[in-house]
Image (cartoon, rainbow, N blue to C red):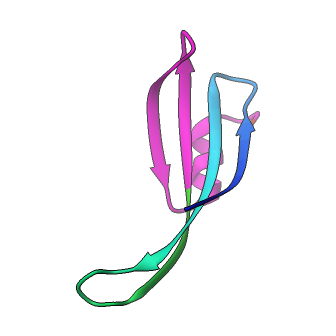
């Protein structure tokens, strides 16, 4: 796993773009995908998180200022 970027939104969200590489155990198919996580921070802790395959959807979930 490789962290491509981490961005703090003006709201309480943090957006992390991650690239995952590997092979599926049973099929042997190679996997190379980017995922976007949106973490909501409250009281200095992650209170919610979401996983998105599309970076645009992650940015939309983080709010208009992200």
**Residue 35 is drawn in which quadrant?**
bottom right
Image location of residue 31, percent across then percent down:
46, 80
User: Is 63 drawn above or below residue 37 in the view shown?
Assistant: above
**For the point 46% across and 50% down, which residue is it?**
51
User: Closest to the observer: 66 or 39?
Assistant: 39
**For the point 54% across and 27% down, which residue is it?**
40
Image location of residue 11, percent across then percent down:
68, 23
Image check: 34 left or right of 8? left
**Residue 29 is drawn in which quadrant?**
bottom left
Image location of residue 49, percent across then percent down:
46, 36
| Image quadrant in which the C terminus is located | top right
Is 64 a magenta residue?
yes
| Image quadrant in which the N terminus is located | bottom right
Is 56 a magenta residue?
yes
Residue positioned most to the bottom: 28
Please state the extent of the stretch shown in magenta in the rendering: 36-65
Image check: 21 left or right of 23? right
User: Closest to the observer: 32 or 54?
Assistant: 32
User: Closest to the observer: 27 or 35?
Assistant: 27
């Amino acid at each position: 796993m490789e962290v491509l970027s981490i961005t703090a939104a003006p709201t309480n969200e943090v957006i992390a773009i991650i690239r995952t590489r590997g092979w599926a155990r049973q099929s042997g198919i190679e996997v190379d995908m980017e995922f976007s996580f949106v973490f909501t921070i409250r009281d200095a802790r992650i209170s919610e998180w979401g996983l998105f395959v599309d970076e645009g959807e992650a940015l939309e979930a983080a709010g208009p200022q992200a």
